[in-house]
Image (cartoon, helix red, strand yellow):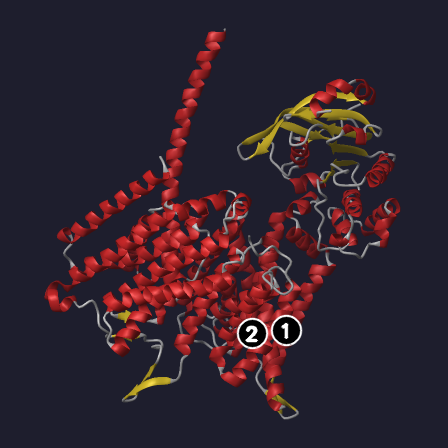
Amino acid sequence: MDPLLSVKQLVSGYRRLRVLQGVSMDVLPGGITAIIGPNGHGKSTLLRTIAGLMPAWSGTVTFNGKELPVGAPDRAREGLVLVPQGDQLFTGMTVEENLLMGAYTRKDASAIQHTLSEVYALFPRLLERRSQRANSLSGGERRMVGIGRGMMADANFMMIDEPSLGLAPLIIEQIYGALKKLTTGGRTILVVEENPSRVAHVASKFYLVDGGYMAWNGNADDLAVSGNLLKTYLGG
Amino acid sequence: MDAILQIIITGLTLGAMYALASVGLALTYGTMGMFNMAHGVFMTVGAYSAYAAVAYFGLAFPVALVTGLAAGAAIGAVTHLLVVRHMLKTEGFEINIIVATAGVAILSEDLILKIFGAYPFRQPLQLDGTFRVGGLAVTYQSVGILAAAAALVGVMTWILTQTRFGLAIRATAMNREAAMLMGVKADQIYLQVLVIAGLLAAAAGIMISSLATLSPQMGANPLLRAFVICVVAGLGSVTGAGFAAIALGLFEAAIQYYYGVRYGFPLMLALVIIVLIWKPAGLFGQQDVIRS
Amino acid sequence: MSRFDELQKHLLYALLLFVLMAILPLFVTQRYLLGEVITFMLWVSVALQWNVLMGHAGVFSLGQMLFFVSGSYTVAMLGSYLGVSPWLSIPLGAAVAAVAALVIGVACLRLAPAYVALLTFAIGFMILTLIISESECYITTGGNCLTFWGGTNGFSQFPDFGFRQWLRGSWLLGNYFTVLGAFIVSLVSSIVVIHGRLGLAFRAMSDSATYAASRGINRTKFQITAFVITAFFTGMTGGVHAAHFRFAGPSLLELSTMMFILAMVIVGGLKSTWGPVLGGVFMMILLEVAKSFGEVRNTLIGLVLVGFVLLLPKGVAGAGSSILAALGRSKKMQNTAGEEHDRQAQNA
C-alpha cells in the first residue's frame, strides 16, 4: 500500500533553534497512527511543519503521492487538516460559526450542511450549544468543536495535536471513541500524544519522536512488548 | 426643546461621519493589530478625488462619488502592497507600522498639497436645501449623510456577519494561524481589509469635506477622533466603535452648542482618558491592554 | 566589558564630541552655517531624549513636543509678560515639562504601547488646537488682539541670553556655546540613563517581563521615571530653543516637526546610543540638499520614515553593528571549521 503521507528527513525549527533533526515517517491510509514521545521534543513541531505553519528547513513531505505546496492555506486546500494543540478556536464566534469556518475551502452549500449534521450526530452536545460563543464552552466541548471543525473540511486525512490535553479521563474516552468512529468512514487520523497509554488501544502504528529524531516505530504488538525501552524514553 | 433637537440632529450627523471614519480603523486594528496613521489621508484622498472628478473631469455626482470611493480603496490597497505587507511578520510591528503609516501620511498630504494647492475648495458633492421639521431647519445634506453612513455601515456589518468572506476576516482577526489552517490566505484578507477601510474612509472624507471645506490636512482631525473613538470602544470592537462614534458625536454637538467648538475635542479627550483609567481595555474591549 | 566601563566609554566619546564641537567655530565662521549647527544641536537634543524613552524605556510617546513646548512657552511667556531672563526661566521650563510628564505619565503609561502613542499624540494635538483657537483677547493694543497663549503667531521679542550686550557682534558665538552646553547636558543624561542602573532595569524588563515582575521591578514606575527625566531635558531644550530664536509658537506642535525629529531617531536607530546624532546629521544634510529642489521637505521626511522602517529598521547604527556581527560570525565559523577538520584528521 502506498503511504498517504510520507515525510523524509524533515528538518525544521524556530529562528536559530533546530527542533526536528531529520525526521522520516510514512502514514498508511486508514486507521489511527500515533506519534508519541516526551514533551518539547518536536511532536507538535512535526505536525506544524507538515501542516505548513512553519517552513521546512530541508526534507520533503509528500501527500497523496504529490509534493505539497508551501504554506498552510494551500496545504489545507489539498485536504491536509490539522486540529492544533489547545484547540485554537475562534473564541468570539459561535460553535456553528467555528464549524462553518472549517468548511471554508468548500463551495457546495448542501454538502457543507450535510457534513455539519454529521458533526452534530457525532457530538450531540455541540448541537445543543450551536449558537453559544466558543469561549463559554467547557474544555471537552471545545475539543469537540476543534475536531468538528477539522471534520468540516471533509478531508480523508486529519492530524490532531494532543486531543487529550487538559481533559478528564472520561471525556478523553469520549473523544477517542469519536475518533475511532471517524476512521470507520475510511478516514486516516494522525494523532500526537505524550502518553502512549491514552492511544494504545485505538492506534495501529506508533512513532516515537525523541530529541527531534524518530527514535522508534512499531505497531500495537511491538508497543506491548517494548515497555522497558519506551520507559527510558518516556521516563516511566 | 429646540436646542435639544438641534443638538441631536447635529450630533447624529457628526456621529454618523465619525462612525464611518472609525469603523474602518477598528476593522484594521482588529484584523491586523495595526494603528493606521494614514487613515486620515485615506479620507483626504477620497474627498479630493471626488472633487477632481467633478471639477476637472466634469463627471456627474454619482460617478464622482464612486470615483472617490474607488480612490480610497486604491490607496488602501497601495498602502498594503507597498508598505504593510512587508512588515507584517517582523517584530516590533505594532510600533514600526505607526511610524511607517505616519510617513505615508505626511508624504501623501504633501503630494496632495503639491497637486491641488492649499486653497480650501468647496466639496461639490452636496445636497443643497433645507426642510423644516417642527420648528427646526434640517438640511438635506445632513439627512443624506445619515442615510449614506447608515447604509455603508449596515452593508459592512452584513458582510462581516453573514458572508463567508466576512467570516474569514473575523476568523483571521481572532486567530490568524487557525484561520490559515482552514485555508484562509491571510495576506489576501489583509489586503481586502485595507481596501474596505480605505473605501469607508473615503466616504467619510467626502462627507466631512461637504460640511466644511477641502484642505490637504483635513484628515488629521477626523483621524484623531476616529482613534479616540476606537480606543474608548475597545480596539478591535467594530460595533462598539459604531456606538461610541454616535455617542461621542452627540456629546461633541452638545459641548459645541453650550461652550463653543474649541472645547469639543479637549473635553472628549478628557472623557476618554477617564474611561481608560476606569476600563483600560475600553468599554467593549476584551484585549490585554494593561501590562504589569 | 562591565557596565561601568560601557558608561565610561560613552562618556569619553561625549567628551570628545564636546571638544570637537567647541573648536568647530574656529573653522566654521559663516553665520548661516553656525546657525544650522545650532539648530542641529537643538533637534538632536530632543531626538536623544526621545530615543531613550522609545528605544530603551519602551514608551512609545508621540507627545515629546508637548514637553519641548512647555519649556519654550515658559521662557517665552515669562519673558514677554514679566521680562524674566531665560537663564532663570529655562530651568523653570524644564520643571514645568517634568510636572506635565508626571501627570500624563501617571494617567496613561499603564496602558498598552499603542494606546500611549495615541493618547500622547492626541494630547499634543489638543493643545495645538486650543492655542490656535483661543479667541479671547488678553491684551488689545491698537487694533491688535493678542491672546494669552499667543495664538497662531506665538511669542517673539522677549529677552534672550543677553550676549548682544557682552559680545556685540559675536553674540551668535555666545548662543552657540550655550546651546552646546545644553546639548552636552542632554547627551550626557541620555548616556547615563541608558548605561546606568535605569537602563539596566529596562533591558532586564524587555528581556524577560515576567521575571522582572517577579523580582518586584514595577515596569510602569520605571517608565514614568524615564518619561519625567526625558521630559525635563526636552523642556530644557525647548527653553533654550526659545531663547536662541526669540520665538515660541504652535508650529512646534505640528506633526511635520515631530516627524522630522522622529526621522532622526529612526534613521539613527532606536536602540542605539549615538543613533540620534547620526540621524541628525543625515536629516540635516538631506534637508539642506532638498532645499534646492523646492518645498519637498515633508515628502522627503515621509519617504525617509517609510524607507528606513521597511529597509533598515535598526537604523544606521543598527546596520553598522549588524555588519560587524556578521563579520565576526563568519570569522568564528571559519575557525570552528578549521578545528573540526583538525579533530577529524586526528581521529582518522
Callout 1 secondary element? helix
Q: CA distance from mark 1 to mark 2?
A: 9 Å
Q: Is residue B260 above or below residue C64?
A: below
Q: Amino acid at mark 2?
A: Met
State if disc 2 and disc 1 touch (CB < 8 Å).
Answer: yes
Seen as rendered, the residue at the extreme bottom is: B135
**Which residue: 60% across, 70% down?**
B19
Residue C181 located left or right of residue B95: left
Name the residue nearer the viewer: C125 or C240: C240
Q: Is residue B134 above or below residue B117?
A: below
In the drawing, what numbered circle is on residue B207? 2
Image location of residue A37, percent across then percent down: 70, 27
Q: Residue furthest front?
A: C216
Q: Is residue B67 visible?
A: no
Read off the chain for label 1: B
Residue plotted at (41% across, 71% down): C128
Q: Which type of secondary structure does the marked residue at label 2 adopt?
A: helix
Q: Which residue is mark 1?
A: B148
- Disc 1 marks a residue whose amino acid type is Ala
Q: Nearer the viewer, residue C166 or A67?
A: C166
Q: What residue is drawn where x is 74% and y is 21%? A: A230
Q: Is residue A54 visible?
A: yes
Q: Nearer the viewer, residue C61 or B219?
A: C61
Residue extending furthest toward the top: C348
